[in-house]
């Protein structure tokens, strides 16, 4: 497979900015190459542009090689970078499932790259043939998200394989919610599929959304292009060190995930009893999508009660749907009580603690 032919010609030709920290690597007695203030160490020095210490830890955590990783200020940065690498503005296009995470389209729009939506089935399952039919010779990338946001479900692996193997271009699989799902990550397929990019983030299960740290995993060749186009110092020293420390605490993350999954099951059961909720969709993530009688009205009244959920009413296949994050027990209870109150239902039967 020839990755290079999918890369934009200007990116192929690009001579990347060579920063002081990348021209000299190693130990020296005097660092007089980057116009830094020598006081206030370690913050006065530019950080490692390749984030080697952090990548070594991520590599161990995820079972990949450091050369298969690019780190970004959230997955949002790596989504943006991937489009810059592969899509020629005003000429190439991207195909993505619909509904899905909104940033793919925003990034495509920013780069003036056509964004094509391939509708999921009514039950949010993937129609691989419909998606492939939306591609043409100018489709450079396909975006899949599994578990998908906002629908919460895993996409069928066999159908995804059909796409990864059947598409002559880059396939991005966004696994932001992989820690919550029962299925294995696509990371183990990286060596088999050189056209695959897998996205992970520290923003969800790891509880680090404020820190802004996400990752793409791909072949060494693709990662080489990410390294060419990213800003040299895209991950600051504080983030590199702090995320490195947090990775040491994987068991705490796993405990959080277990607790959130238990709460999700409980919350789903309670939401099932709310009259104005018509369906609670199955979830492989840390949120629930629910179909209501009137999403706009319920959303407004929840806001008045100080409870903010995500109104997905205007999203494809999600008419009258709300997306609800699994929160603390108190937050979840406040939500259910507010919903029952709107429906004039006494909460006593529903809210008994286990
Ligand atoms: C939350 C989320 C992300 C995470 O984005 P960050 O920039 O890493 O915070 C990525 N993809 C999907 C589908 C998400 O829902």
Image: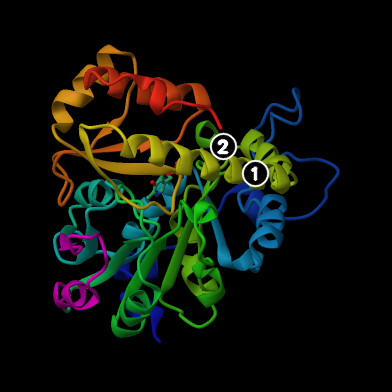
Pointers 1 and 2 in contact (C-beta within 8 Å) = yes
Above or below for 153 versus 268: below
* Residue 339 seen in this snapshot: yes
- Residue 312's spot in the image, x, y percent? 21, 39
Residue occupying the point 43% across, 72% down = 196
Residue occupying the point 26% across, 12% down = 304
Report the side of 168 relative to 333 (left or right): left
Furthest toward the front, the residue is 349
- Residue 21's spot in the image, x, y percent? 65, 48
What residue is disc 1 on? 253
Q: Is residue 117 magenta-colored?
A: yes
Query: Which is nearer the eye, 178 or 169?
Result: 178
* Residue 234 seen in this snapshot: no
Element on which disc 2 rests: loop
What residue is disc 2 on? 207
Rounded to the nearest angstrom, the CA distance separating label 1 from label 2 is 8 Å
Furthest toward the right, the residue is 29
Location of the C terminus by quadrant is: top right
Above or below for 266 versus 160: above
Q: Is residue 198 magenta-colored?
A: no
Residue occupying the point 20% across, 77% down = 132
Report the side of 202 relative to 47 (left or right): left
Location of the N terminus by quadrant is: bottom left
What is the crowding at mark 2: few (fewer than 14 residues within 10 Å), some, or many (at least 20)? few
Element on which disc 1 rests: helix
Tell me where the magenta segment starts and ends, as one range. 116-136
């Amino acid at each position: 497979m020839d990755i290079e032919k999918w890369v934009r010609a200007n990116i192929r030709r690009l001579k990347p900015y060579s920063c002081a920290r990348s021209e000299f690597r190693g130990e020296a007695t005097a660092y007089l190459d980057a116009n830094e203030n020598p006081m206030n160490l370690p913050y006065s020095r530019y950080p490692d542009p390749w984030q080697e210490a952090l990548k070594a830890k991520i590599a161990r955590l995820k079972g990949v090689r450091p050369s298969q990783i690019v780190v970004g200020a959230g997955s949002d940065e790596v989504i943006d970078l991937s489009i810059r690498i592969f899509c020629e503005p005003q000429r190439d296009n991207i195909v993505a499932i619909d509904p899905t995470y909104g940033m793919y389209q925003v990034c495509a729009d920013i780069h003036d790259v056509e964004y094509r939506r391939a509708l999921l089935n009514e039950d949010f399952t993937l129609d691989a043939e419909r998606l492939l039919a939306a591609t043409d010779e100018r489709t450079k990338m396909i975006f899949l998200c599994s578990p998908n946001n906002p629908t919460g479900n895993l996409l069928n692996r066999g159908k995804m394989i059909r796409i990864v193997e059947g598409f002559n271009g880059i396939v991005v699989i966004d696994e932001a919610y992989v820690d919550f799902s029962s299925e294995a990550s696509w990371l183990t397929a990286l060596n088999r599929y050189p056209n695959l990019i897998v996205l992970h983030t520290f923003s969800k299960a790891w509880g680090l959304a404020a820190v802004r740290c996400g990752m793409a995993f791909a072949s060494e060749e693709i990662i080489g292009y990410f390294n060419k186009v990213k800003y040299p110092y895209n991950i600051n020293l504080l983030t590199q060190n702090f995320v490195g420390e947090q990775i040491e605490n994987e068991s705490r993350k796993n405990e959080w995930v277990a607790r959130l999954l238990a709460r999700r099951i409980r919350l789903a059961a309670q939401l099932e009893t709310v009259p104005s909720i018509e369906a609670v969709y199955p979830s492989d993530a840390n949120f629930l999508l629910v179909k209501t009688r009137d999403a706009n009205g319920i959303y407004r009244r929840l806001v008045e009660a100080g409870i903010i959920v995500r109104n997905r009413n205007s999203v494809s296949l999600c008419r009258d749907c709300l997306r609800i994050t699994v929160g603390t027990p108190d937050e979840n209870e406040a939500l259910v009580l507010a919903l029952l109150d709107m429906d004039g239902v006494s909460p006593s039967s529903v809210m008994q603690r286990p």
